[in-house]
Image (tube, rainbow, N blue to C red):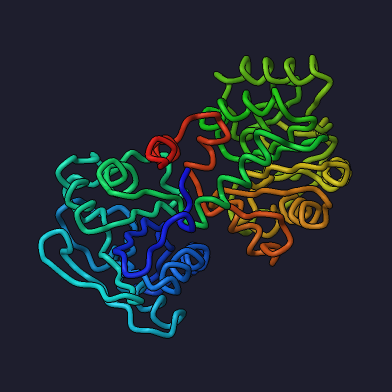
């Protein structure tokens, strides 16, 4: 696909679709990571002397209805301070004319306020395209969405390319999925196996070790014949878990052996954490984390790995007494010599809480697109960028 560096963009109108969907608390940005990840492409365009427009979605507004809480105003303010230059926020930008000077940056208000954005309305996409000479897709986190600002605009814009963040995200994922160095370890956590069954099945064809956490791990433990008490589990997917276990074993791969777990009777921040052998779990116990002996074994597997893919915490890391497994895992991955790629909101939150974000090879800002790429799906944004390659 075309890269932004392939085009001369001086004095050209450049429309960047970024992922600036940052968490907000009372109108204040609580994590700037997605903005920081988008800055290299924005800076590149500004230094090249382009007339730069950037838009993004934020939150889940109803199309056609402006809400202050979903406005990109705080993002525009942050960009102005970070770039040390004025950054205007253009509201109702599909309904009025505006100009952008060379070397200037404007933020176009939340694109999901526009009626037809999510449905990839053709007329809206054509309107977007008329605003620009070069469309830059840099929001890998929305690459799985076929919307007017992520896909439709690319059908009509004169020139189309990937931004620097999009390129780096794609390269990191391809390095893990298409050309992994072996042995490969995948860590998949989450409450429900049903939401990640396709990923687990896909990874079971590739990995040497599949490390599981959360409710997913409980379902697999039950499939292996262990008593898990009242732990979160999806009984309907036990046959699927058994198939994945069999597939791993038939390839000489495996799940790590779980020897101990951390249990409680109820899930709350004051619930005592009790370490038990996997054989000592009672009928009224709930498993909330993997135990220290299990984590020693898992850390050793991670130490031997040359490629690591991580999506999802091991335990209920939000509660300190059930966070040791995830913290141990974060340290093991951070200290590994392997190429390590982590993605997903909870995973990133865990990594940041332990101050490990700079110790991994790559931390993806993508969520749903990250998972769908791992599943092997062709993402709409990748398809259109490849199709519009000059």
- Can residue 31 be seen here? The reply is no
Q: Quadrant of residue 130?
A: bottom left
Q: Is residue 144 left or right of residue 228?
A: left
Q: Nearer the viewer, residue 146 or 310?
A: 146
Between residue 132 and residue 117, name the one nearer to us: 132
Picture layout, residue 284 above or below residue 313: above
Left/right placement of residue 298 relative to residue 49 reads right
Asked if 385 appears above or below 350 in the picture, the reply is above
**Number of numbered tags placed on the structure image:** 0
Q: Position of residue 68 (x, y in %)?
A: 24, 68
Q: Residue at x 34, y 64 (%)?
A: 54
In the image, residue 76 above or below residue 196: below
- Whole-percent x, y for residue 295 in the image: 82, 45
- The structure residue drawn at horizontal position 51% and vertical position 57%, both measured from the top left corner, is 164
Relative image position of residue 298 (x, y in whole percent): 83, 42
In this view, the residue in front, 57 or 16, is 16
Q: Quadrant of the C terminus?
A: top left
Q: Looking at the image, can residue 374 be seen? A: yes
Query: Which residue is pictured at 34% across the width and 58% down the height?
Result: 56
346 relative to 43 in the view: left or right = right
Query: Which residue: 47% across, 68% down?
Result: 44
């Amino acid at each position: 696909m075309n890269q932004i560096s392939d085009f001369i963009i001086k004095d050209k109108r450049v429309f960047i679709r970024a992922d600036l969907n940052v968490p907000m608390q009372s109108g204040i940005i609580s994590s700037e990571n997605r903005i920081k990840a988008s800055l290299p492409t924005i800076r590149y365009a500004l230094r090249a002397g382009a007339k730069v427009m950037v838009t993004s979605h934020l939150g889940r507004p109803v199309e056609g209805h402006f809400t202050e809480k979903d406005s990109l105003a705080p993002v525009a303010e942050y960009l102005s301070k970070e770039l040390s230059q004025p950054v205007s926020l253009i509201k109702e930008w599909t309904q009025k004319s505006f100009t952008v000077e060379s070397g200037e940056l404007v933020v176009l208000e939340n694109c999901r306020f526009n009626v037809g954005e999510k449905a990839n309305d053709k007329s809206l996409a054509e309107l977007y395209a008329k605003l620009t000479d070069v469309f830059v897709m840099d929001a890998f986190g929305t690459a799985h969405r076929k919307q007017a600002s992520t896909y439709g605009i690319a059908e009509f814009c004169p020139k189309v390319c990937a931004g620097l963040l999009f390129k780096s995200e794609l390269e990191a994922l391809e390095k893990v999925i298409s050309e992994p160095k072996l042995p490969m370890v995948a860590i998949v956590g989450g409450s429900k196996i049903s939401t990640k069954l396709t990923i687990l099945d896909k990874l079971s064809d590739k990995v040497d070790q599949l490390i599981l956490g959360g409710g997913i791990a409980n379902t697999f433990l039950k499939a292996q014949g262990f008593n898990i008490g009242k732990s979160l589990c999806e009984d309907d997917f036990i046959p699927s878990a058994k198939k994945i276990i069999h597939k791993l074993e038939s390839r000489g791969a495996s799940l790590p052996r779980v020897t101990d777990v951390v249990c409680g009777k109820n899930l709350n921040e004051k619930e005592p954490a009790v370490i038990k052998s996997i054989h000592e779990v009672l009928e009224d116990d709930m498993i909330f984390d993997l135990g220290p002996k299990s984590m020693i074994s898992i850390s050793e597997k991670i130490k031997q790995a040359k490629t690591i893919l991580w999506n999802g915490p091991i335990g209920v890391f939000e509660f300190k007494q059930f966070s040791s497994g995830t913290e141990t895992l974060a340290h093991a991955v951070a200290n590994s010599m392997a190429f390590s790629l982590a993605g997903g909101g909870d995973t990133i939150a865990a990594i940041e809480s332990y101050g490990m974000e700079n110790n991994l090879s790559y931390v993806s800002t993508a969520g749903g697109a990250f998972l769908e790429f791992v599943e092997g799906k062709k993402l709409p944004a990748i398809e259109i960028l490849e199709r519009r390659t000059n």
